[in-house]
Image: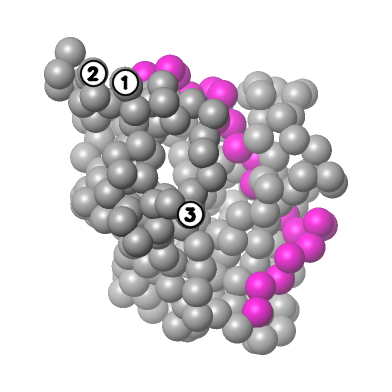
Amino acid sequence: MKKLVVASNMFNEIHQLDCKDSWYDNMTQIADGGILIVDTGSDDGTKEFFEDKDNVVFITDDIILREGYGPSRNHLRAMSRKHYPESHWCLYLDGDERIMQEDFHKLRFLKDYLIPEYDVIALPRLNRLDKDTTATKNDYMIAPDYQARMTRLGSPLQYIRKLHEQIVDYNKMYVQLNNPKIHHFHRSTDQKKRDFIGKLCQKLHAEDIDYGGTYPQHHKSEYYKDLLEKEGLYGEKA
């Protein structure tokens, strides 16, 4: 059977870890290869939460702030190969994302039996409007919001762009509506954290000289641009 590493970039995610149906509890059910955390420098207890977890490699590195989301994905792949050399797949999930139990069997089947011509598995993402999964922004049958999050560690593929990262140099991508779904609980994140992410995205957009003009305009871009200029990334100007 092929082993799977779950890898994540985190920053102040204790509210997603020290709770019912936590990110960590969810990931331990699918990460038979191990769990890798690259943390930007959390000061809310995130680091302390992982200190006694034997199945977790915890690294402190602010690569997203320095280089952006594409390079951070490449870094997660490199660190997964280094620390979990026997693992075959890497799956990237943020602190506010989960794979539900009804999709565990599909996930295991794909990682063990998907033919080697496919280097990437794209998962539909449901943007949940509440923690109880009773309301969703998009119907994945109509607008699946595919996320290319599961990649073979032996593939030469690379992620590019600082924001809205894309994959290059891969063979084939397995894209099916019945693939395991990512449940994105971004609405469960407090406003301070959401504002931080919005400001960070504006910062990376401005810095991405090669690809900045290719990004779609977010409906709150001007709001976060003004907020970044007023507050700074960490509120240091307030």
Q: In whole angstroms, how far apart are the C-alphas of marks 2 and 3?
A: 26 Å
Q: Which residues are magenta?
A: 172-193
Q: Quadrant of the N terminus?
A: bottom right
| Residue type marked 1 | Leu
Residues at badges 2 and 3 in contact (C-beta under 8 Å)?
Answer: no
Q: Nearer the viewer, mark 2 or mark 3?
A: 3
Write down the residue under mark 1. Answer: 227
| Residue 38 in view in this figure | no
What residue sits 15% from the left and 21% below the top? 236
What residue sits 40% from the left and 58% below the top? 211
Residue 167, given in percent of the width and then of the height, sits at 51, 68
Residues at badges 1 and 2 in contact (C-beta under 8 Å)?
Answer: yes
Q: Earlier in the sequence, mark 2 or mark 3?
A: 3
Q: Nearer the viewer, mark 1 or mark 3?
A: 3
- Neighbor class of circle 3 (other Cα within 10 Å; few <14, some 14-19, many 20+) is few
What residue sits 56% from the left and 41% below the top? 97
Write down the residue under mark 3. Answer: 214
